[in-house]
Amino acid sequence: MAEQKRLLDVHEDARASEHRSGRGKMRWLVGVAVLIGLIILIAASVAIAVGVSLAAGKSPPLVWWKSAIIYQCYPRSFQDSNGDGSGDLAGITSRVQYLKDLGVKVVWLNPIFASPQKDNGYDISDYTSIDPLYGTLSDFNNLLEALHREGLYLILDFVPNHTSDEHPWFIESRSGVTSAKRDWYVWANPSQDGGPPNNWQSVFGGSAWSLDNLTGQYYLHQFSDFQPDLNYRNPEVISAMQSVLSFWLDLGVDGFRVDAAKFLLEDPYLRNESVDPSFSNTTCNVSIPGCLYNSLIHNLTTDYPGLHDITRGWRKVLDCYSNKFMVAEAYDPIDIVVQYYGTNGDEFNFPFNFFLLGNTNWTASAVSEIISTWLDNMPSGAWANWVLGNHDNPRIASKAGLYLARALNVLLLTLPGTPTTYYGEEILMTNVFVPPNQTQDVYQGRDVERTPMQWDGGLNAGFTSGSPWLPLATNYTTFNVMNESLSNTSMLALYKQLASLRQEFISFAYSLDSVEGNVLSFHRYDSSSSVDYLVVINFASESSTVAIKSPSLHPQLLLSSMLDKSGPVDLSNLSLRGGEALIIKGTQKG
């Protein structure tokens, strides 16, 4: 009986265990069913939302870097917070509300990393620390948090081609030929005559090689001699630089602008570059830094095969995070530049389009050709972008003239794709004369477009309570944020209106209408929308009257670049003042 009772107890325990197990399985199945149901519900909601948007003539929301305006902020010249005469991170943080109100969505900072500052931060001695000139890592985190809180994004300059000669990596590398980091840089023995290994030239002038007296070898520097080139044929270098990206991404940075991307790899055999037959000694002033650089065809030191394998590796690092952005700097012919898009999005989101930036012929036909060339050469499915100014080129208001600068900002913010604005363009800042004794730039000439931001008409334009690191423009009492904020017809007012208006047609297609004389017109349209937008720009300094053949019905002038008129217009007899741009909204024919 005792044994029978024991067996019955075991049987009951087994049944209870089976019941609990079954009940657990049932709960698990119910949980899975609920989860699947939620996923289906969310997917259906998204599909319905997208469907409703399309039915209402609206395109689905674009990814952030497509819908944004990128604002290039030169940190040393934006806002000084401590009176030392140089802009800093805390100063930028104090101006976040300005950036938000301006209508930009992405802030790009030039280098803020530890540096001897011989080339304004493009000579980095520590990739993962903040230079004291700009503040601390805590200041950086405060800025990042402030931007994100306002719905803005932050991208940093990534300077991978070279370091400072004061970077610990290079100090160790040059300590001896058997150094563990010797192969982190490009070293070579002298030529047979004891000179540089070959004829390669530095962008900043002179040979691209400098002799290290301690070891008797030359090191490569495609820029200044204090900027030794890293060796990307060394896997350790590739890994180290990928770790730099990860460091900043882990902090929450939204992406990177990659500096001097085309210089990353060189010919491993160190062969001489060929002389460019189109180069003329008579037009080259050897006293100008870098003049002789143009005497060679740089097929062995730029865009060398294997470069895109390196940059695709960086894309893979970014893809380990959510929706990060990467843009390349590469001054090259169009067929070379577009290669930086990669294949099916495996490289850069886009390479900077510098063809408007480098333009010197501000005619309707020349600008139309620049636009068409870029759009026609982009890979299928790629996203366009446009740039008028940056820290290495004269300001657009000086280069094209104040009379045309407003219209060019209309162009920048109405073309299809992502525009980049250089700080101060929104208030018509111009180049500034910098006396020789105040020059800061190692590659002389670029200081003129890097001068302090003009916030008001008071002492030092509201930039600093100390002595500014570069002189201010003589016209800052006229062209400044405070003055222009008080005017309904200022460049600042125009910029804000354009930033808002572009959201209405940001995903619309582009179509060139006509080039009539010096007047360019183009359409932004969408087949799912009942409206379209016509942009007309007069590049001449004198007034013009044109007849625009347009499919639009009931055209209404939304704004003139002068901000002084609006209302119905007659497209068959359209008058524009010199340097004026018009944005006209119409109804598409059914």
Image: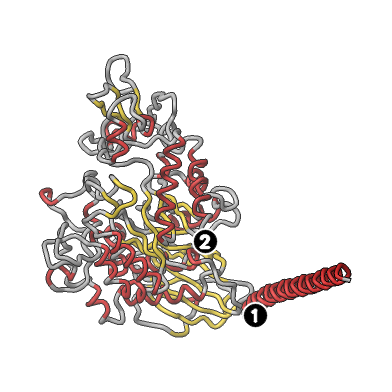
| Residue 454 seen from this side | yes
How crowded pointer 1 is (Cα within 10 Å; few <14, some 14-19, many 20+) is rated as some
Q: Nearer the viewer, residue 125 or 109?
A: 125
| Residue 363 seen from this side | no
Of tags 1 and 2, the one toward the viewer is 2
- Indicate the quadrant containing the C terminus: top left, top right, bottom left or bottom right: bottom right
Which disc number belongs to residue 298? none
Residue 107 in the figure: left or right of residue 483: right
Q: Position of residue 46 (x, y in %)?
A: 64, 75
**Given the current orientation, which residue lies at the most extreme bottom position?**
567
On the image, numbered disc 2 is attached to which residue?
A: 322
Residue 466 in the figure: left or right of residue 372: left
Q: Residue at x 44, y 34 (%)?
A: 234
Disc 2 residue type (three-letter): Ser
On the image, numbered disc 1 is attached to which residue?
A: 52
Say which label, 1 or 2, has the lower sequence index. 1
**Given the current orientation, which residue lies at the most extreme top position?**
192
Residue 504 in the figure: left or right of residue 29: left
Q: Nearer the viewer, residue 336 or 548?
A: 336
Q: Residue at x 26, y 21 (%)?
A: 216
Q: Position of residue 551 (x, y in %)?
A: 59, 74
Disc 1 residue type (three-letter): Val
Q: Nearer the viewer, residue 207 or 533?
A: 207
Q: Position of residue 145 (x, y in %)?
A: 37, 69
Dividing the picture into quarters, in which one does residue 409 lie? bottom left
